[in-house]
Amino acid sequence: MSLFITFEGGEGCGKSTQSRMLSRRLKKLAVPSLLIHEPGITALGKKITQLLKWSKDIKISPLAELLLFNVSRVQLVTEVIKPNLEKGVIVLCDRYADSTIAYQGYGRGLDLDKVKATNALGMQGVIPNLSILLDVPAETGFARNKDKKPDRFEKENLSFHKRVREGYLKLAKAEPKHWLVIDATKTKEEIAAIIWQRVSKRLPG
């Protein structure tokens, strides 16, 4: 049995922490699993990450962002996600296509139908079984990241990140059975327990 679980949310929501905690728990139980993140992991993805997040002298348009994220996604799905799901491995992904809808669609203002159509090419039919949204006010996320060196997206103003959050909440409201929305102002232990309660029901045995 394979599962594809994605972790989503705005900056400072704690999704990377929670994906690592779930990964460790699965490994302790000897459940075959793999933790990955977008847009890195593959050789191509790492180069695209450098461009998208840390380029200083290159101006990247919203449409170019959309395309670059999906170029990376094609490679990730082809090289990593599909082969592992076919082997029965549980794949945990820190960000996936919903991030592109939230950031490039709602955040940047690109046409949502075009974003979704482009995402469909990148995903190649690989849709998460469960998407976990760690919801936190943009102001709280900013405060949590104040001591961290910001990337291109983290440098965006508060209104951008509020639009991103609004986008995520709209996505979750549209497909409540697909999403697990968690108040990310809770402690990391409380959040991990909520996630485990949902995920454990999907595990064999």
Image (spheres, rainbow, N blue to C red):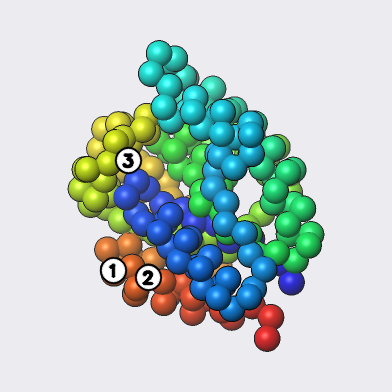
Q: Earlier in the sequence, mark 3 or mark 1?
A: 3
* Residues at discs 2 and 1 in contact (Cβ within 8 Å): yes
Crowd band around label 3 with a 10 angstrom C-alpha radius: few (<14), some (14–19), many (20+): many
Counting from the top left corner in percent of width and height, residue 108 is at 42, 30
Q: Which residue does the image show at 51% across and 32% down from the upper left?
A: 49
Q: Nearer the viewer, residue 74 or 138?
A: 74
Q: Which residue is mark 3?
A: 161
Left or right of 112? Residue 185 is left
Amino acid type at circle 1 is Lys
Q: Earlier in the sequence, mark 2 or mark 3?
A: 3
User: Which label belongs to residue 105?
Assistant: none
Crowd band around label 1 with a 10 angstrom C-alpha radius: few (<14), some (14–19), many (20+): few
User: Which label belongs to residue 191?
Assistant: 2
Q: Image quadrant for the N terminus?
A: bottom right
Amino acid type at circle 2 is Ile
Left or right of 31? Residue 39 is left
Q: Nearer the viewer, residue 107 or 70?
A: 70
Q: Earlier in the sequence, mark 2 or mark 1?
A: 1
Counting from the top left corner in percent of width and height, residue 156 is at 31, 31
Q: Nearer the viewer, residue 118 or 27?
A: 27
Q: Which residue is mark 1?
A: 186
Is 179 rendered above or below residue 69? below
Residue 174 in sight from this viewpoint: no
Amino acid type at circle 3 is His
Q: Which residue does the image show at 73% across and 57% down from the upper left?
A: 84
Foreground tag (3 vs 1): 1
* Residues at discs 2 and 3 in contact (Cβ within 8 Å): no
Foreground tag (2 vs 3): 2
Left or right of 170? Residue 79 is right
Q: Give the secondary structure at mark 1.
A: loop
Q: Give the secondary structure at mark 2.
A: helix
Residue 123 in sight from this viewpoint: yes
